[in-house]
Image (cartoon, helix red, strand yellow):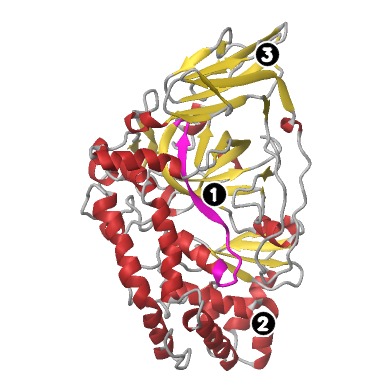
């Protein structure tokens, strides 16, 4: 099996019927990085039996063989993530055996010059994950507010002391897909240029090359792609808020293919990606500064919000959960998802990225502000038929009603003009669509009510201006009946609970690994803001929260929300779900 540097894939139309025209994304031209490297052949043997895969999730020793290089060339390899050079790395002479997790990087050299791309292979020994120490990695991750940030690599052994929990831990490591990100160590943890040492830095200057390997949960061969990575997000960039940072992955021709083609979310969905986000989670997780939110840690809410948006007929970024390794170190449970920006819009509805205007809260990503300013000028001005006509020209009002019903059903407690939503429209005359993003502060208490929240230049301001129009209240009432009352409605108790239960069932074993990796952090490494600082575990924290939501929250929330809408004068009596 020769090494192929870029995965193949096909592009399929989007499977939904969103309010914009569907289209087929164009296939990118392959770069030179997608050629076969005919000089190197890798074969693996486990317990003496050859296996077909190149990289591996394994539990026994692996024997690695590289083809003999051509005359006048040398293969050099490293095992710490660093990039081999003509003077750095071990020359290959004969097959070798790996006993431990290893990030193997190798390349071919002739007369002091590298004549092949650098190839990365991740060999992750699953039965040793619980014993990782971070040996050789720095004891601090940069400086924050004049103080060194203490690093954390170990897993909490006391969580895995129960044999049944440990068995679920090991099974859970295979139950989800695995993502391995390999960096030069200085690009990841280095004091001068490491992402983890400088998590507050933004922009392309703080993008670092990496190799991404994706191992499907079904045991299919891994896919790999060279890419760039940055720290992603806002609040949880702060080291004191979370040591588990999110990443945004970029596919650019300077690293490898300009787009990654892979059926990441199934062949019936977009299979071409310009970027992806590895969401680490912040609110309602075991690392949050609030003891109340840590006790509610479930890791599902944001994915549930996006899934529900799609079931309501809205466009929403796809996502699923993965285990993430950084240079072979287990880093926890992550939500791998699309970023719902202008590139996402092009992949869903066709055309080029530049055909779309997009914004992430207050940040304009593509296009200009003219249509946005016109929309809010009409909304914030005196109510009139002309103003409503202008709003309807610039906003998909029915889709907006659906979007607001979802966020108010979940009682979203963390959105304003600044962040936690996206908006896109097709230029020059398309209508704005709002897309769900970062819905972690939802599904908290059954009687939570955020209908009064309001902030200019945000979805809530548009809602409060539109609700003064009988025409919009009529649309809102019809959409509320459709989603909350009618059979099959996405926000009926049975449908909402089943959508949540799907992820709860899938994560029951994998959540043990997240607990072992980060469940002791606030107790042992960095108690922060409000207690109690506990050992967060599946049995004592996660499972009770899942039961509370599925047995108490979802059965009651639909009726409570209908009552809140009626009391606010937004809808009439729609009855109750049959």
Q: Nearer the N terminus, badge 2 or badge 1?
A: 1
Q: Nearer the N terminus, badge 3 or badge 1?
A: 3
Q: Which residues are magenta?
A: 310-328
Mark 2 or 3: the one toward you = 3
Q: Dot 1: what SS?
A: strand
Residue 446 falls in image quadrant: bottom left
Please say if 62 is above or below 506: above
Relative to the observer, which residue lies in front, 288 or 69? 69
Residue placed under numbered mark 2 in the picture: 392
The disc placed on residue 31 is: none
Residue 567: image x %, image y %?
39, 90
The reply to whether the magenta stretch includes residue 313 is: yes
Please say if 274 is above or below 453: above
Please say if 56 is above or below 11: above
Q: Residue at x 30, y 55 (%)?
A: 542
Q: Residues within 10 Å of mark 3 (few under 14, many from 20)?
A: many
Residue placed under numbered mark 1 in the picture: 277
Residue placed under numbered mark 3 in the picture: 109
Residue 491: image x %, image y %?
47, 75
Residue 145 seen by the camera: no
Residue 336: image x %, image y %?
52, 49
Residue 504: image x %, image y %?
39, 57
Mark 2 or 1: the one toward you = 1
Q: Residue at x 70, y 80 (%)?
A: 393
Q: Dot 3: what SS?
A: strand
Relative to the observer, which residue lies in front, 391 or 14? 14
Residue extending furthest front? 49
Q: Residue at x 67, y 31 (%)?
A: 5
Query: Mark 2 and mark 1: span between their CA atoms?
Result: 32 Å
Determine whether, in the image, residue 27 is placed left or right of residue 523.
Answer: right
Residue 133 falls in image quadrant: top left
Q: Dot 2: what SS?
A: helix
């Amino acid at each position: 099996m020769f090494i192929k540097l870029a995965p193949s894939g096909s592009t399929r139309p989007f499977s939904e019927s969103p309010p914009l025209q569907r289209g087929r994304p164009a296939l990118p031209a392959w770069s030179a990085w997608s050629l076969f490297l005919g000089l190197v052949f890798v074969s693996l043997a486990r317990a003496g039996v050859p296996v077909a895969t190149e990289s591996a999730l394994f539990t026994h020793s692996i024997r690695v063989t590289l083809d003999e290089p051509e005359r006048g060339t040398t293969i050099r390899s490293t095992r710490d993530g660093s990039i081999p050079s003509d003077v750095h790395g071990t020359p290959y002479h004969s097959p070798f055996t790996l006993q431990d997790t290893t990030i193997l990087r190798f390349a071919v050299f002739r007369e002091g010059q590298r004549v092949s791309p650098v190839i990365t292979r991740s060999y992750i020994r699953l039965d040793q994950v619980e014993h990782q120490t971070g040996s050789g990695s720095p004891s601090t991750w940069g400086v924050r507010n004049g103080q060194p940030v203490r690093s954390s690599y170990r897993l909490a052994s006391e969580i895995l002391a129960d044999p049944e929990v440990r068995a679920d831990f090991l099974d859970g490591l295979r139950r989800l897909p695995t993502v391995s990100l390999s960096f030069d160590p200085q690009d990841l943890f280095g004091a001068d240029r490491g992402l983890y040492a400088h998590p507050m830095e933004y922009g392309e200057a703080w993008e670092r090359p990496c190799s991404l390997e994706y191992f499907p949960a079904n045991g299919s061969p891994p896919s790999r792609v060279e890419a760039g990575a940055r720290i992603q997000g806002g609040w949880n960039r702060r080291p004191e808020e979370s040591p588990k940072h999110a990443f945004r992955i970029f596919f650019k021709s300077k690293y490898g293919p300009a787009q990654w083609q892979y059926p990441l979310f199934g062949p019936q969905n977009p299979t071409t990606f310009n970027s992806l986000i590895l969401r680490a989670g912040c609110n309602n997780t075991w690392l949050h500064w609030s003891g109340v939110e840590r006790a509610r840690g479930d890791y599902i809410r944001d994915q549930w919000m996006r899934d529900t948006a799609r079931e309501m007929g809205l466009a929403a970024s796809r996502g699923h959960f993965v285990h993430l390794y950084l240079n072979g170190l287990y880093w926890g449970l992550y939500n791998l998802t699309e970023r719902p920006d202008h590139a996402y819009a092009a992949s869903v509805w066709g055309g080029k990225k530049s055909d779309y205007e997009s914004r992430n809260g207050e940040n304009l990503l593509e296009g200009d502000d003219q249509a946005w300013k016109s929309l809010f000028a009409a909304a914030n001005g005196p109510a009139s038929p002309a103003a409503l006509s202008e709003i309807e020209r610039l906003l998909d009002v029915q889709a907006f009603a659906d979007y607001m019903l979802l966020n108010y059903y979940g009682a979203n407690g963390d959105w304003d003009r600044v962040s936690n939503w996206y908006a896109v429209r097709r230029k020059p005359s398309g209508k704005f669509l709002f897309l769900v993003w970062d819905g972690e502060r939802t599904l908290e208490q059954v009687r939570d009510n955020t209908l009064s929240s309001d902030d200019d230049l945000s979805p809530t301001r548009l809602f409060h201006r539109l609700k003064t129009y009988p025409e919009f209240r009529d649309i809102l009432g019809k959409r509320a009946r459709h989603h909350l009352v009618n059979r099959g409605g996405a926000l009926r108790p049975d449908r909402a609970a089943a959508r949540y239960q799907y992820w709860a069932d899938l994560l029951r074993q994998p959540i043990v690994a997240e607990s072992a990796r980060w469940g002791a952090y606030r107790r042992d490494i960095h108690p922060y803001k409000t207690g109690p600082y506990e050992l967060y575990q599946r049995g004592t924290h996660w499972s009770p929260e899942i039961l509370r939501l599925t047995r108490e929250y979802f059965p009651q929330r639909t009726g409570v929300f209908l009552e809140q809408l009626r009391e606010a004068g937004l809808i009439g009596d729609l009855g109750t779900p049959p």
